Image (cartoon, rainbow, N blue to C red):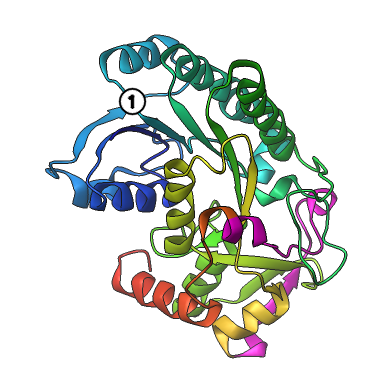
Protein backbone atom coordinates (compact mmCIF):
# COMPACT_ATOMS: atom_id res chain seq x y z
CA UNK A 1 0.00 0.00 0.00
CA UNK A 2 0.90 3.67 -0.23
CA UNK A 3 1.05 5.04 3.31
CA UNK A 4 1.45 8.54 4.74
CA UNK A 5 3.03 8.61 8.19
CA UNK A 6 2.99 11.94 10.02
CA UNK A 7 5.43 12.26 12.90
CA UNK A 8 7.42 9.37 11.47
CA UNK A 9 10.77 10.68 12.74
CA UNK A 10 9.51 10.63 16.32
CA UNK A 11 10.03 7.91 18.89
CA UNK A 12 6.94 5.77 18.20
CA UNK A 13 6.77 6.96 14.58
CA UNK A 14 10.22 5.53 13.91
CA UNK A 15 9.09 2.06 15.02
CA UNK A 16 5.85 2.33 13.03
CA UNK A 17 7.90 3.26 9.94
CA UNK A 18 10.15 0.24 10.50
CA UNK A 19 7.21 -2.15 10.70
CA UNK A 20 5.47 -0.68 7.64
CA UNK A 21 8.65 -0.95 5.60
CA UNK A 22 9.18 -4.54 6.77
CA UNK A 23 5.61 -5.28 5.65
CA UNK A 24 6.50 -4.14 2.13
CA UNK A 25 4.62 -0.85 1.84
CA UNK A 26 5.69 2.43 0.26
CA UNK A 27 5.93 5.04 3.00
CA UNK A 28 5.99 8.83 2.89
CA UNK A 29 7.08 10.42 6.18
CA UNK A 30 6.19 14.00 7.14
CA UNK A 31 7.82 15.46 10.26
CA UNK A 32 8.72 19.02 11.22
CA UNK A 33 11.50 17.71 13.54
CA UNK A 34 10.23 19.83 16.44
CA UNK A 35 10.24 16.62 18.48
CA UNK A 36 11.41 13.97 16.01
CA UNK A 37 14.99 13.49 14.85
CA UNK A 38 16.49 12.63 11.46
CA UNK A 39 18.79 10.16 13.22
CA UNK A 40 15.76 8.09 14.22
CA UNK A 41 15.11 7.15 10.60
CA UNK A 42 18.68 7.30 9.27
CA UNK A 43 18.80 3.50 8.87
CA UNK A 44 15.87 3.64 6.44
CA UNK A 45 17.58 6.03 4.00
CA UNK A 46 18.00 4.17 0.75
CA UNK A 47 15.31 1.63 1.66
CA UNK A 48 13.27 0.94 -1.49
CA UNK A 49 10.05 1.31 0.48
CA UNK A 50 10.80 4.78 1.83
CA UNK A 51 9.31 6.93 -0.92
CA UNK A 52 10.21 10.26 0.70
CA UNK A 53 11.00 12.07 3.91
CA UNK A 54 9.46 15.54 3.92
CA UNK A 55 10.53 18.02 6.58
CA UNK A 56 7.32 19.95 6.99
CA UNK A 57 4.42 20.70 9.28
CA UNK A 58 0.87 19.37 9.20
CA UNK A 59 -0.20 23.00 9.61
CA UNK A 60 0.97 23.59 6.01
CA UNK A 61 -2.24 22.98 4.07
CA UNK A 62 -0.54 23.48 0.70
CA UNK A 63 1.97 20.76 1.51
CA UNK A 64 -0.76 18.37 2.62
CA UNK A 65 -2.88 19.07 -0.47
CA UNK A 66 0.10 18.39 -2.76
CA UNK A 67 0.97 15.14 -1.01
CA UNK A 68 -2.56 13.77 -1.11
CA UNK A 69 -3.11 14.89 -4.71
CA UNK A 70 0.14 13.43 -6.02
CA UNK A 71 0.03 10.07 -4.22
CA UNK A 72 -2.89 7.69 -3.89
CA UNK A 73 -2.55 6.95 -0.19
CA UNK A 74 -4.37 3.94 1.22
CA UNK A 75 -3.82 4.78 4.89
CA UNK A 76 -2.67 7.81 6.86
CA UNK A 77 -1.10 7.03 10.20
CA UNK A 78 -1.34 10.36 11.98
CA UNK A 79 1.17 10.51 14.85
CA UNK A 80 2.45 14.10 14.50
CA UNK A 81 1.69 16.04 17.68
CA UNK A 82 2.96 18.17 20.53
CA UNK A 83 3.14 15.63 23.34
CA UNK A 84 4.65 17.33 26.39
CA UNK A 85 2.17 18.00 29.21
CA UNK A 86 4.16 20.81 30.83
CA UNK A 87 4.73 22.51 27.46
CA UNK A 88 0.97 22.44 26.88
CA UNK A 89 0.41 24.16 30.23
CA UNK A 90 3.06 26.80 29.53
CA UNK A 91 2.04 27.37 25.89
CA UNK A 92 -1.41 25.90 25.17
CA UNK A 93 -1.73 27.46 21.72
CA UNK A 94 1.15 25.52 20.18
CA UNK A 95 -0.29 22.24 21.44
CA UNK A 96 -3.82 23.14 20.30
CA UNK A 97 -2.59 24.21 16.87
CA UNK A 98 -0.56 21.06 16.29
CA UNK A 99 -2.82 18.50 17.95
CA UNK A 100 -6.30 19.79 17.10
CA UNK A 101 -6.08 22.13 14.12
CA UNK A 102 -3.33 20.08 12.47
CA UNK A 103 -5.43 16.96 12.85
CA UNK A 104 -8.38 18.75 11.23
CA UNK A 105 -6.21 19.66 8.23
CA UNK A 106 -5.07 16.04 7.84
CA UNK A 107 -8.66 14.83 8.23
CA UNK A 108 -9.87 17.12 5.49
CA UNK A 109 -7.36 15.69 3.01
CA UNK A 110 -8.29 12.16 4.07
CA UNK A 111 -11.97 12.99 3.47
CA UNK A 112 -11.34 14.52 0.04
CA UNK A 113 -9.29 11.51 -1.08
CA UNK A 114 -11.07 8.76 0.88
CA UNK A 115 -8.01 7.72 2.88
CA UNK A 116 -8.33 5.78 6.13
CA UNK A 117 -6.86 7.65 9.11
CA UNK A 118 -5.40 6.06 12.23
CA UNK A 119 -5.28 8.81 14.85
CA UNK A 120 -2.78 8.48 17.68
CA UNK A 121 -4.30 9.77 20.88
CA UNK A 122 -3.13 9.13 24.44
CA UNK A 123 -4.05 7.52 27.75
CA UNK A 124 -3.65 10.99 29.29
CA UNK A 125 -7.23 11.78 28.26
CA UNK A 126 -8.54 9.42 30.97
CA UNK A 127 -9.59 10.08 34.53
CA UNK A 128 -7.75 7.99 37.11
CA UNK A 129 -8.35 4.26 37.26
CA UNK A 130 -10.40 3.31 40.33
CA UNK A 131 -9.85 -0.46 40.48
CA UNK A 132 -7.66 -3.28 39.23
CA UNK A 133 -9.90 -4.15 36.27
CA UNK A 134 -8.17 -1.42 34.28
CA UNK A 135 -9.32 1.43 32.09
CA UNK A 136 -11.59 0.45 29.21
CA UNK A 137 -12.51 2.72 26.32
CA UNK A 138 -15.75 3.56 28.16
CA UNK A 139 -13.89 4.94 31.18
CA UNK A 140 -14.57 8.62 32.02
CA UNK A 141 -12.27 11.15 30.38
CA UNK A 142 -10.78 14.16 32.17
CA UNK A 143 -8.84 16.82 30.23
CA UNK A 144 -6.45 17.66 33.08
CA UNK A 145 -4.02 19.46 30.74
CA UNK A 146 -4.32 21.39 27.46
CA UNK A 147 -2.51 18.42 25.87
CA UNK A 148 -5.30 16.06 26.93
CA UNK A 149 -7.94 18.62 25.97
CA UNK A 150 -6.44 19.08 22.50
CA UNK A 151 -6.31 15.32 21.95
CA UNK A 152 -9.94 14.87 23.06
CA UNK A 153 -11.04 17.63 20.67
CA UNK A 154 -9.13 15.96 17.83
CA UNK A 155 -10.54 12.53 18.72
CA UNK A 156 -14.07 13.88 18.45
CA UNK A 157 -13.37 15.36 15.03
CA UNK A 158 -11.84 12.09 13.83
CA UNK A 159 -14.87 10.10 14.96
CA UNK A 160 -17.26 12.69 13.50
CA UNK A 161 -15.79 12.02 10.05
CA UNK A 162 -16.62 8.35 10.43
CA UNK A 163 -20.24 9.06 11.35
CA UNK A 164 -20.83 12.09 9.08
CA UNK A 165 -18.95 10.97 5.97
CA UNK A 166 -18.42 7.23 6.37
CA UNK A 167 -14.66 7.83 6.33
CA UNK A 168 -12.76 4.88 7.81
CA UNK A 169 -11.21 6.27 10.99
CA UNK A 170 -9.89 4.80 14.23
CA UNK A 171 -8.72 6.48 17.43
CA UNK A 172 -5.98 4.63 19.28
CA UNK A 173 -4.98 5.31 22.87
CA UNK A 174 -1.65 3.66 23.72
CA UNK A 175 -0.61 3.83 27.36
CA UNK A 176 2.81 5.07 28.45
CA UNK A 177 5.19 3.81 25.77
CA UNK A 178 8.92 3.38 26.30
CA UNK A 179 11.90 1.76 24.61
CA UNK A 180 14.88 2.38 22.31
CA UNK A 181 14.97 5.76 20.50
CA UNK A 182 12.99 7.53 23.22
CA UNK A 183 14.59 10.77 24.35
CA UNK A 184 16.47 10.52 27.65
CA UNK A 185 16.18 14.22 28.54
CA UNK A 186 13.40 16.48 29.74
CA UNK A 187 11.01 15.60 26.91
CA UNK A 188 11.61 11.89 27.26
CA UNK A 189 9.66 9.27 29.15
CA UNK A 190 10.20 8.27 32.75
CA UNK A 191 11.82 4.92 31.90
CA UNK A 192 14.40 6.43 29.54
CA UNK A 193 15.21 9.24 31.97
CA UNK A 194 15.59 6.86 34.92
CA UNK A 195 17.86 4.52 32.91
CA UNK A 196 20.08 7.36 31.70
CA UNK A 197 20.43 8.72 35.23
CA UNK A 198 21.31 5.25 36.50
CA UNK A 199 23.98 4.79 33.83
CA UNK A 200 25.49 8.23 34.42
CA UNK A 201 25.57 7.91 38.21
CA UNK A 202 22.90 10.52 38.87
CA UNK A 203 19.96 10.40 41.28
CA UNK A 204 16.58 9.26 40.02
CA UNK A 205 14.24 12.17 40.77
CA UNK A 206 10.55 11.44 41.30
CA UNK A 207 7.87 14.11 41.10
CA UNK A 208 5.66 14.10 44.19
CA UNK A 209 5.38 11.11 46.51
CA UNK A 210 5.90 8.51 43.76
CA UNK A 211 2.75 6.54 44.52
CA UNK A 212 1.27 7.43 41.12
CA UNK A 213 1.20 4.41 38.81
CA UNK A 214 1.81 3.91 35.09
CA UNK A 215 1.03 1.13 32.66
CA UNK A 216 4.21 0.87 30.59
CA UNK A 217 4.03 -0.49 27.04
CA UNK A 218 7.17 -1.54 25.16
CA UNK A 219 7.50 0.39 21.90
CA UNK A 220 7.61 -2.63 19.57
CA UNK A 221 4.35 -3.88 21.07
CA UNK A 222 2.94 -0.38 20.59
CA UNK A 223 4.02 -0.10 16.95
CA UNK A 224 2.54 -3.51 16.18
CA UNK A 225 -0.76 -2.28 17.64
CA UNK A 226 -0.65 1.00 15.67
CA UNK A 227 0.02 -0.75 12.36
CA UNK A 228 -2.63 -3.43 12.90
CA UNK A 229 -5.25 -0.76 13.61
CA UNK A 230 -4.64 0.52 10.07
CA UNK A 231 -4.93 -2.90 8.48
CA UNK A 232 -8.19 -3.91 10.17
CA UNK A 233 -11.67 -2.75 9.17
CA UNK A 234 -13.10 -4.12 12.42
CA UNK A 235 -11.84 -1.11 14.41
CA UNK A 236 -13.20 1.57 12.05
CA UNK A 237 -15.27 4.06 14.04
CA UNK A 238 -13.82 2.81 17.32
CA UNK A 239 -11.56 4.00 20.12
CA UNK A 240 -9.07 1.28 21.10
CA UNK A 241 -6.63 1.07 24.03
CA UNK A 242 -3.28 -0.68 24.18
CA UNK A 243 -1.19 -1.29 27.26
CA UNK A 244 0.62 -3.93 29.25
CA UNK A 245 -2.34 -4.56 31.55
CA UNK A 246 -0.08 -4.10 34.58
CA UNK A 247 0.67 -0.89 36.43
CA UNK A 248 3.63 -0.01 38.62
CA UNK A 249 4.19 2.90 40.99
CA UNK A 250 6.92 5.34 40.05
CA UNK A 251 8.64 4.49 43.34
CA UNK A 252 8.74 0.79 42.41
CA UNK A 253 9.80 1.60 38.85
CA UNK A 254 12.74 3.67 40.10
CA UNK A 255 13.83 0.82 42.35
CA UNK A 256 13.43 -1.71 39.51
CA UNK A 257 15.63 0.41 37.24
CA UNK A 258 18.28 1.48 39.75
CA UNK A 259 18.38 -1.38 42.24
CA UNK A 260 19.48 1.17 44.84
CA UNK A 261 16.97 3.02 47.00
CA UNK A 262 19.67 5.49 48.11
CA UNK A 263 19.77 6.97 44.60
CA UNK A 264 16.03 7.72 44.56
CA UNK A 265 14.99 11.25 45.50
CA UNK A 266 11.59 12.95 45.63
CA UNK A 267 11.20 16.48 44.26
CA UNK A 268 8.35 18.97 44.07
CA UNK A 269 5.87 18.10 41.31
CA UNK A 270 5.91 20.52 38.38
CA UNK A 271 2.24 19.97 37.44
CA UNK A 272 0.38 18.16 40.25
CA UNK A 273 -2.94 19.43 38.90
CA UNK A 274 -2.44 17.36 35.74
CA UNK A 275 -1.17 14.19 37.42
CA UNK A 276 -3.22 11.02 36.93
CA UNK A 277 -2.80 8.98 40.10
CA UNK A 278 -3.48 5.53 38.67
CA UNK A 279 -3.17 4.43 35.04
CA UNK A 280 -3.88 0.78 34.25
CA UNK A 281 -4.95 -0.39 30.79
CA UNK A 282 -7.64 -2.89 29.99
CA UNK A 283 -6.72 -3.96 26.44
CA UNK A 284 -9.57 -6.44 26.01
CA UNK A 285 -11.01 -4.59 23.02
CA UNK A 286 -7.69 -4.66 21.13
CA UNK A 287 -7.43 -8.37 21.84
CA UNK A 288 -11.00 -8.99 20.65
CA UNK A 289 -10.96 -6.84 17.49
CA UNK A 290 -7.30 -7.05 16.46
CA UNK A 291 -6.04 -10.19 18.12
CA UNK A 292 -3.41 -7.95 19.71
CA UNK A 293 -1.79 -8.35 23.10
CA UNK A 294 1.58 -7.28 24.48
CA UNK A 295 4.49 -9.68 24.12
CA UNK A 296 7.28 -7.93 26.08
CA UNK A 297 7.26 -7.86 29.89
CA UNK A 298 8.24 -4.73 31.80
CA UNK A 299 11.43 -6.35 33.07
CA UNK A 300 12.48 -7.48 29.57
CA UNK A 301 11.57 -4.11 28.07
CA UNK A 302 13.69 -2.26 30.63
CA UNK A 303 16.60 -4.61 29.91
CA UNK A 304 16.32 -4.00 26.15
CA UNK A 305 16.01 -0.25 26.63
CA UNK A 306 18.99 -0.05 28.98
CA UNK A 307 21.12 -2.06 26.56
CA UNK A 308 20.21 0.34 23.74
CA UNK A 309 20.86 3.52 25.78
CA UNK A 310 24.20 2.10 26.98
CA UNK A 311 25.22 1.42 23.37
CA UNK A 312 24.50 4.96 22.13
CA UNK A 313 26.10 8.34 22.69
CA UNK A 314 23.09 9.40 24.75
CA UNK A 315 25.10 8.89 27.94
Q: At which x and y percent is residue 101?
A: 60, 20
Direction from residue 177 to residue 86 in the image, left or right: right
Direction from residue 31 to residue 123 in the image, left or right: right
Q: Secondary structure at mark 1?
A: loop
Residue topped by disc 1: 73
In this view, 122 is above or below 184: above
Q: At which x and y percent is residue 201?
A: 49, 80
Direction from residue 238 to residue 139 in the image, left or right: right
Region of the chain picked out in magenta, as a range = 260-288
**Is 264 a magenta residue?**
yes
Quadrant (top left/top right/bottom left/bottom right) for the C terminus: bottom left
Residue depicted at x 16% and y 44%: 45
Residue 110 appearing in the image? yes
Residue depicted at x 66% and y 66%: 215
Looking at this view, name the residue that lies furthest to the right.
130
Quadrant (top left/top right/bottom left/bottom right) for the N terminus: top left
Residue nearer the viewer, 70 or 254? 70
Classed neighbour count for the residue bearing mark 1: other residues with Cα under 10 Å, few (<14), some (14–19), many (≥20):
many
Residue nearer the viewer, 234 or 57? 234
Residue nearer the viewer, 93 or 130? 130
**Is 234 a magenta residue?**
no
The quarter of the displayed image where residue 37 is located: top left
Direction from residue 105 to residue 43 in the image, left or right: left
Residue depicted at x 39% and y 9%: 62
Residue depicted at x 25% and y 41%: 25
Q: At which x and y percent is residue 17?
A: 32, 46
Count of numbered circles on the image: 1
Amino acid sequence: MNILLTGGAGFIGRWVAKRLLEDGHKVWIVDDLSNGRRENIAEFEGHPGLAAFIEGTILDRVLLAELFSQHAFDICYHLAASINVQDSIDDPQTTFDNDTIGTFYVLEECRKHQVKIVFMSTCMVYDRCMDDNGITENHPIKPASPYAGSKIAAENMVLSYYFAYGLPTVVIRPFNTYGPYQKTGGEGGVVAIFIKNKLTGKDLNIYGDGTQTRDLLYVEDCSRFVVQAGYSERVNGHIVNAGLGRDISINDLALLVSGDSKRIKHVEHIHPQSEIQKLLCNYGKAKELLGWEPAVSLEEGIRLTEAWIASTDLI
